[in-house]
Amino acid sequence: MKKVSLYFLAVLFAGVFASCSDDEDEVLPITMEQATSKAMAATSGTVIASTTTTTAAGVTYFEIDVKTSSGAIIEFEYYQEDGSLKGIEGDQGPFDYEVDPGMGLIKFSAAKDAALNAQPGEVLRWSLKEEFPDVWIYTFEVLASNGEEFEVGVNAQTGAAEVK
């Protein structure tokens, strides 16, 4: 009986210890250096600016601007709280680069191809944002050959494109 009681106490103690030290679900804030590393893992280029912004609601995020070898500028934003992606924007071309946002989302080049198949023209700017919980959308502003501007949304999970 004494062996069973000692065994029970050992198992109980191990369970309590494991539950107290189980930090798998704990999300830690990231630093600017970690946000910069995330941006550089997503594309190639040189970091030309990095800023920290805190919103009126108290949400802090890091913005990292990367200049590609062809002169384009890509802006990455990551939440400080957990390092998750807030968004990516390309406001200055040429848009001849690759961006891999990770998270199971399609790469920029595949989204750009889908957008230009839906609405032929020239990309003026683009962004990737979470439009609804767990629904990421690439938005492209496209200049058609007739001079008309169109907005094309591309589902970043499926690659489905829709001219808006």
Image (cartoon, helix red, strand yellow):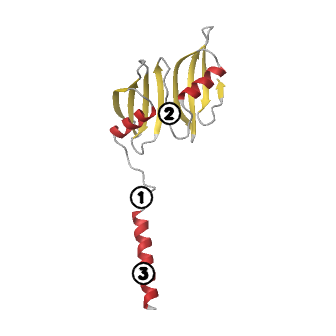
Q: Secondary structure at mark 2?
A: loop
**How far apart are labels 1 and 3 at the CA level?**
23 Å
Q: Is residue 139 left or right of residue 55?
A: right
Query: Which numbered disc flags the more N-terminal residue, 1 or 2?
Result: 1
Disc 2 residue type? Answer: Asp
Residue 56: quarter of image: top left
Disc 1 residue type? Answer: Asp
* 26 up-or-down from 47: above or below: below
Residue that mark 2 sits on: 100
Q: Is residue 70 left or right of residue 125?
A: left
Residue pictured at 60% horizontal, 23% vertical? 113
Query: Which numbered disc flags the more N-terminal residue, 1 or 3?
Result: 3
| Image spot of residue 12 (x, y percent) | 44, 76
Residue pictured at 36% horizontal, 40% vertical? 34
Q: Secondary structure at mark 3?
A: helix
Dots 3, 2 in contact, CB < 8 A: no
Disc 3 residue type? Answer: Leu
Q: How many marks?
A: 3
> Tag on residue 23?
1
The C terminus lies in which quarter of the figure?
A: top right
Dots 1, 2 in contact, CB < 8 A: no
> 123 or 55, which lies in front?
123
| Image spot of residue 49 (x, y percent) | 34, 27
Residue that mark 3 sits on: 9
